[in-house]
Image (cartoon, rainbow, N blue to C red):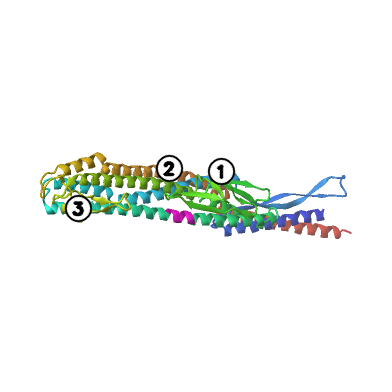
Amino acid sequence: MAADLLTIARSGTRAAKAALDVTAQNITNASSAGYVRRSVSLAELGVNSVLSQPGAINLAGVRIAGIVRNADMFRQSEVRRTGSDAARAGAEVQGLQNIESAVEQTGVYDAIVDFEAALKQLLSDPTDGSLRASALEQARTLAQTFNTAASSLDAVGEGLRFEAQDAVGSVNTTAAELARVNLRLGRASDASSDQTSLLDQRDSLLEKLSGQVDISTTFAADGSVQVRIGGSGGPSLVNGGSAATLAMTVDADGTIAFTLGGAAATLSSGALAGKGQALTELAGVREQLDAIAAGVISTLNTAQVAGADLTGAAGQPLLSGSAAADIALALTSGSQIATAPAGSGANSRDTSNLVAMRAALESADPAGAMDALLFGISSAVAGRTVTRNALESIAGTAKVALQAQAGVDLDEEALNLTRFQQAFQASGRIMQVASDIFDSILAIR
């Protein structure tokens, strides 16, 4: 009997000590990012007895079955999925906001309106040098604002591509680390402290990856993970101890595409997908801006060459270039603005050609096109912002749900410290009682 009590008490002290150690570890790492709360898993300890029937099992205390991580794989998957969607929306909104600022703050719309106003003023006195100089300067300002808008959009594109390339490097680094963790998990003992630490590291790396690209995971029995990007049918990023290399290519219009191990990879979520979507939007905006600039160049130059300037000479193109980036003022003097019809003499007050120029501008309506462009960008920003806020709320809810399960509650851990300490003391007391009983038996005469 005394030996049975000693066995039971000894197993109890071991279990209580292990639980105290795990509780202390939980408290120490309460604020550590990626740490998942641990608990000790206990099982009945059975022994065979020669005094019982063959095959009979006598319970002799408890044994430590392992260290358990209190994390639900489904909730972790939801955190990765919702976080990836939120990261995509956030990156896209940031890119669109930069695009909006690049176009709106350069004042292309205002420059178009001001130039049209200067032509209207010139109608009052086509021979007035100051009015001609004002119209010429407004044309110069118009060309320069188009140039500034184009260079600003180029800067936004360069920034997005730089960030995307940096994110690609981060994905490759994280994937390589995850492959090393897979190798170590294959060598780690089941339910050991080393294995649980590796599983924490694995989950942190997966969450980091999901912030950049959409991933699909398949877990092996030893805890190692296979990672695919672009959905469950996408190319493999991490498989066992090997990791493929993600690469980015830049197309002629500035948009980006991705390959993984040489195979095309399509991303639907994650920050990289958001930057790719922003660059696609940027390419569309740049195309529209170039179309507006080309329309202004064609309209004004067509009207110019159809008339005569203040000296009676045939009108020359007002603007050079073919797009927003290279549009420039071609005339050197306000007297070269062709306000009169072709064949008119010097200092003609006939404004027929100027009227035709203004009519052509009104028909082309570059101001309206620019206003539509700005409205489209602003609408896209507003709509994507609503989507981003909703996705961030969903991701936040998923994180809270996981934290409630996997996070460390200091009040609960303090209670566990007291409970396990009492269990340790109780087991020690049982050992003392068993010793006293054995001594009493030996003392019987």
Give yes or no for contact between labels 3 and 1 (Cβ–Cβ under 8 Å).
no
**Residue that carries the numbered disc 3 in the rendered image:** 136
Q: Please tell me which residue is depicted at 81% across the width and 46% down the height of the picture.
A: 57
The residues colored magenta run 160-165
Q: Mark 1 vs mark 2: which is more N-terminal?
A: 1
Return the residue at label 1: 231
SS under mark 3: helix
> Circle 2 — which element?
helix
Residue at the top extreme of this rendering: 363
From the viewer's perspective, is 402 left or right of 425?
left
Tag count: 3
Please tell me whether mark 3 or mark 1 is closer to you in this view: 3
Residue 249 visible in the picture: yes
Residue 235 within the segment the image draws in magenta: no
Q: Which mark is residue 262?
A: none
Reply above or below: 24 against 97. below
Q: From the viewer's perspective, is the residue at label 1 or at label 2 nearer?
A: 1
Q: How far separated are the C-alphas under marks 3 and 2?
A: 45 Å
Lateral position of residue 259 relative to residue 191, left or right = left
Residue 124 versus residue 108: which sits nearer the camera?
124
Q: Is residue 161 magenta?
A: yes
Query: x%, y% of residue 46?
Result: 79, 49
Location of the C terminus (image quadrant): bottom right
CA–CA distance in space, label 1 to label 2: 22 Å
Mark carried by residue 387: 2
